[in-house]
Every structure is written in C-alpha cells, then in structure tokens.
C-alpha cells in the first residue's frame, strides 16, 4: 500500500510513561487472555524477521524492548539459544509473568543466558551494544518514536539489526470517529505512516517494511473498551478523558458489534 508522506511533529505526542506503566501493570493478569491483536502480531513479526534477515545472521547479544508477557521472547530464545538475551519492559508485573513463562512452562536450554530488567525506553538507556534489538507492538507507546529509533541505532553493533512491529497510520480510526462525533479530542495523535518511519530510520543502511491491516470485531462497543482495559491499552496521555464525554460516546454507540481496525507495520533496519 502506498502511504501519504505527511509528517506530524513528535512534540504533539502525548504519551506519559508513568500512566503506561500503571495501565500495563493493572492488566498483567488479564493480558494473555485479552491480547488477540498482540498475539496475532507476535506470529507475524518473526515470520517477517526470518524472511528478511541477511544470510548467515546469528546474533550473540539480543535486546527485547517491551517484552510484555513474552509472546516474542520465547520464539527468539528458541531460534538463538546460544545468545545472551536481555528482556525488558516498563512493567515489573509483565516481566514477572514473562520470566515465569520462560522458566516454568518451557525452560530454555541450559546454555541459554537470559536476564530481565525494568526499562522505560522513553529515557536514554546504555545497556551495551547488541547484534539484534527486537520489539513486538510496543513502539506506539513511545513519547517520541524518532528519538527511540535513534537510541536503538546507538545500541547496535555495525551490521546489527533493529526489528519491530508497531501500530501505523489509520489504526483505531473507528474510535477516533466516535470521539470526534462526541466533540471530544482523541487523546493520542495519529500514528506515523511508513514514510515517516523510513525518515526516522534514515541513519540505517537498510530499511524493509510490510503493512499488515487487521480488523477485529467485538460483540459491542463496551466489549471493545473492556478489551482495551484488559490489555492495558488505555489512555496513556497526560490529559484525562472527561467522564461525561466518555458516557456520551458509549450511549451513542450502537448496541450491535463494533469493528476496530489495526494497521500494523513490521519493520527491519540494518545498521
């Protein structure tokens, strides 16, 4: 699909890390059951990754940003059992579930080295250099995704890879329309398009991407909002949504099913 190359200044972003951490920590126990789109994206990203990596690429140090409960973690560990692996997330509760899943459900080989660390990727991080930095559907929570991509560039060895999936332009368009109809500003600006991500990653020597649109149908609008809450994907902005406006949006929503559109980008960059 061709993308409109419009650019939205990152200063318009309204992501607040403390709220992101609280939202995901509250949803840690319900996340696995409710994360339908996240689970789907976690199957597509490795397929994209393995289909596009340079021939003979075998990372010795791997960093995962925003591991959540481990949808991507276990797959990459299985593919590269001899690598040093660092899994990070902003939520300690998510990390705990990921750690338990890795060591209790499917213990890695004895020679596998994996550590878990709380990390807010909205801040500067100096964790050494990695051959691979990977992230599944987390970059949309960055307050400045361009700055985040620059940080990942600095954290890679020459020839290292950055591979991530993220929400792209057009995602949640139905929800944005509901807010607009109620006279309320949607708290999160439009997500960047592929052209913007390509510009953000201009320092990389190679940029490969694919666009994977998905529509998920919920039994009702209220059921959709409940699913957002159960995955922690609720308002991360500093500005609160007025309760009166939210009630108006919910009351005007039809009682039948609600379909939400997710435009997922898979991106691979070579340093």
Image (spheres, rainbow, N blue to C red):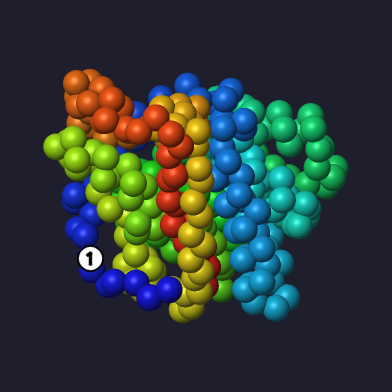
Q: What residue is drawn where x is 35% and y is 33%?
A: 254
Q: Helix, strand or loop at disc 1? A: loop
User: Residue 209, percent across and down?
Assistant: 49, 70
The answer to whether residue 270 is left or right of residue 241 is right
Query: Is residue 176 positioned above or below 239 on the image?
Result: below
User: Residue 244, percent across and down?
Assistant: 19, 21
Quadrant position of the N terminus in the picture: bottom left
Relative to the observer, which residue lies in front, 45 or 229?
229
User: Residue 55, percent across and down?
Assistant: 70, 78
Q: What residue is drawn where x is 34% and y is 64%?
A: 193
Q: What residue is drawn where x is 50% and y is 42%?
A: 217
**Mark 1 = which residue?**
7
Q: Is residue 251 visible?
A: yes
The answer to whether residue 106 is left or right of residue 1 is right
Q: Quadrant of residue 20?
A: top left
Q: What residue is drawn where x is 71% and y is 28%?
A: 100
Q: Residue furthest left?
A: 183
Relative to the observer, which residue lies in front, 14 or 35?
35
């Amino acid at each position: 699909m061709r993308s409109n190359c419009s650019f939205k200044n990152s200063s318009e972003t309204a992501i607040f890390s403390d709220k992101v951490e609280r939202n995901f920590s509250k949803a840690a126990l319900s996340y696995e059951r409710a994360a339908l789109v996240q689970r789907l994206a976690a199957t597509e990203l490795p397929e994209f990754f393995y289909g596009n990596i340079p021939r003979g690429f075998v990372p010795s140090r791997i960093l995962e940003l925003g591991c959540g409960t481990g949808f991507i973690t276990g797959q990459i560990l299985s593919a590269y059992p001899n690598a040093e692996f660092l899994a990070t997330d902003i939520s300690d509760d998510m990390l705990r579930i990921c750690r338990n899943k890795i060591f209790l459900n499917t213990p890695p080989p004895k020679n596998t080295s994996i550590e878990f660390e709380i990390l807010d990727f909205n801040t500067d991080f100096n964790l050494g250099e990695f051959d691979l930095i990977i992230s599944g559907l987390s970059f949309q929570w960055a307050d400045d995704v361009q700055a985040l991509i620059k940080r990942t560039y600095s954290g890679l060895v020459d020839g290292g890879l950055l591979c991530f999936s993220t929400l792209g332009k057009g995602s949640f368009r139905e929800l944005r329309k509901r807010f607009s109809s109620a006279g309320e500003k949607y708290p999160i600006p439009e997500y960047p398009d592929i052209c913007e991500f390509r510009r953000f990653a201009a320092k990389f020597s190679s940029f490969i991407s694919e666009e994977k649109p998905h529509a998920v149908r919920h039994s009702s609008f209220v059921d959709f909002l409940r699913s957002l809450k159960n995955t922690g994907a609720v308002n991360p902005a500093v500005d609160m949504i007025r309760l009166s406006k939210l009630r108006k949006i919910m009351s005007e929503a039809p009682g039948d099913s609600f379909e939400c559109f997710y435009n997922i980008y898979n991106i691979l960059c070579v340093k």
